Amino acid sequence: MYGTERNRQSPRHQRHPSTVRRSLVAWLLALSLLIGSWPVQVQAAEKPTPLTPEQVAALLPQLFKLHLKEHEMNGAFMKRVLKEYLNNLDPSHSFFLKSEADAITDVSDEQLRKLAETSLYGDLSYFTTTLQGFLNTQIARDKAMYDGLEKRADEVKALLKKDKPKAEANADKGKDPTPEKPDAKTAEADKDAGELAQPAVPPDDLEDPEEIAKANERPLTQADREKRLLKATAGLYRMHKTYLSENEAYKQAVLTVREDRARWLGLKVDDEVPKLFLKSFMAAMDPHTVYFDAEEDEEFTSRLEPSFAGIGVQIRPCPLGAQVEDIIKGGPADKSGKFEPNDQIVQVDDYVLCGLPINKIVRRIKGKKGTEVKLTVLKSDTRQTEIITLVRDEINLAELRVKGKKFDTPAGLVGLISVTTFYRGVHGDVQERIKELSKDKPLAALVLDLRDNHGGYLEEAVALAGLFIGSGWIVGERDGRDVVNWKDDPDAGTAYGGPLVVLTNQYSASASEIVAGTLKDYGRAVIAAPTQTFGKGTVQRVIPLNGMNLPGELKITTHQYFLAGGSSTQQKGVEPDVVIPGWKLAASLLEKASENSIPWAKIEGRVNLDSPDVKLWNTWKKNNLAALAEKSKQRVEANQELKDFFDLKKRRAKAEAEEAEEKPRKPDEAPSVAERKKKEDKDPQADEATAMAADMIPTWPALEKQAAK
């Protein structure tokens, strides 16, 4: 076995670097001088081969040089690596008992020191032994339990009746009660794009996030594990039957639960260990330093691109493959006229999709522009299969990622623009929405909605903030040597100069916090939110590895960013100017709750307080913010429906009542799209932000300064 052979080699022998190591180090150092916030594209000469321990060992010293804070492989750092290795094996806390997990991480200081030393030489035998033990013990013992889930449907469904309507799936599967925790270490398919899957576990606003976090503690006994598995299946069944029939929902719940275990079946241990070790090493540095393998790399990159080549559908998982949730206007699927919501894609070309994870289905449907794809579709109306052949085309995501609405109010026209991610070119799309909304009548006020926006390209955040302030420093980047580089928007001028409300929440992160925080520091906007933002104030550089014919890419934290006022958003986030109703703060899901989080810091700011515009904005804010907040408070107090919307107990009771009133469906009958859409219409936070923006109109001093950029 590989690990045993490595134990026979002495550290002295391992100190001599191979030719591969020398070339890899030279290439990585050269590349590190070139990379910025935009990914560097390097064409691979051939298909990448799996990582080896020697290649990983060659990377480690260079990663220490590049990282903002961590620069040494010592015992304390190795203890964090072990914890992250355990998390990579069992992120949902589904397989290890607490005692088993503790045995892996509870090692002596001397052993940690030795592991730190030997791993630098490419000896990963300890990690090989740990993975093999995990497969032989934790994974192997669960076969009968997972295989028998079909026969326990009645038992699983009874759990929902007993504890209705809680979504234990979130707790027991280790899923956040949000589409995704900002800057998650694993790249899931984007929830908002054609051919990019809807989230496997959507937001569940009936659950207390802190209760979910507490329930995710590791089980103490095997009986606890079995109970957790059944609860996970029950919660997933409840979620899936919001868009599938009861029978299909249970099948999909079982498939979803089994994915955690299935990924470990049949893998090559020697190929897996270097990848898992590198992932754990990166995560031990900080929560946003990540190694993406080849598959994750493709998904991560696609989420920040403005378009892709595909057929233009939004999909969710179903037992036979993927269910069509929506059809993107103007895409090949829309133009064909052959697709309807609730249709199921069961085969792509000659590949049967049954049981395939949604992200892998996405990759099969997407492809090069101009290529044909043959889809076998189970039609929702006839329940007959039909073969549909389409030609892939460019799908522009701007309409999905930057949405605009306008509202006529007594004070004037108020626009609302929601931005879901900071992809390449997003600032131009926001500027275009502003023009569209004000085409027939000038906007008197604007709401910029950055809720649940987890960030993206730093340059796009700078350019987007520049749309509203014109000139001025926007963000400073400080590296590990304490050198600060300030950025401004080189395209001077504003796209909109009137009253501005920025709507955020706990899951607004990174680039969203730059925009919100900068506009707050300048006095340019009023921040409306129920809580602080996420608190991610670090910058990552992307290093593709395909230039050395290695799989995937590295994303490493190299800088901490600072708002124009001098404060970092790291851990503290951006606090609202006006607090509005919303879900209570889930402290365990904030950046500061992460074990390896970079600490907060502050430097000298760069806001020019003597600038006429800055004086004007800050004077207005000083004179009017308190009255604006009081009007909002009075409006909220008089709006019982709004308060009930964010009351968990009342929300649960209402959900139960609505479910009881629903027309009973047959076990094979799926809910209609109309039923599902009806529940998604209300957005009381956006309504309140719009009312707040309208309140700003009469007193705003700079309406005459609006100009097209």
Image: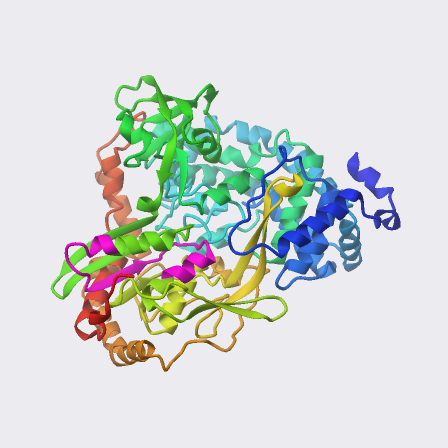
Residue at horizontal 51 percent and vertical 42 percent from the top: 228
The image shows residue 635, relative to residue 249, as above or below, that is: below
The image shows residue 111, relative to residue 656, as above or below, that is: below
Occupied quadrant, residue 480 = bottom right
Please state which of residues 380 and 373 is positioned toward the viewer in this rendering.
373
Residue at horizontal 37 percent and vertical 48 percent from the top: 204
Please state which of residues 21 and 3 is positioned toward the viewer in this rendering.
21
Res. 474 in view: yes
- Looking at the rendered image, the quarter that the C terminus falls into is bottom left
Question: How many marks are shown on the rendered structure?
Answer: 0
Residue at horizontal 41 percent and vertical 64 percent from the top: 490
Q: Please state the horizontal and vertical placement of residue 147, each as a whole percent of the image.
A: 54, 27
Please state which of residues 325 and 196 is positioned toward the viewer in this rendering.
196
Occupied quadrant, residue 273 = top right
- Looking at the rendered image, the quarter that the N terminus falls into is top right
Q: Which residues are magenta?
A: 435-464
Q: Please state the horizontal and vertical placement of residue 571, each as a whole percent of the image.
A: 50, 66
**Left or right of 11 in this view: 514:** left
Q: Please state the horizontal and vertical placement of residue 379, each as a whole percent of the image.
A: 30, 22
Whether residue 448 appears in magenta in the rendering, the answer is: yes
Whether residue 150 appears in magenta in the rendering, the answer is: no
Q: Please state the horizontal and vertical placement of residue 706, each as a whole percent of the image.
A: 23, 67
Res. 341 in view: no
Occupied quadrant, residue 235 = top left
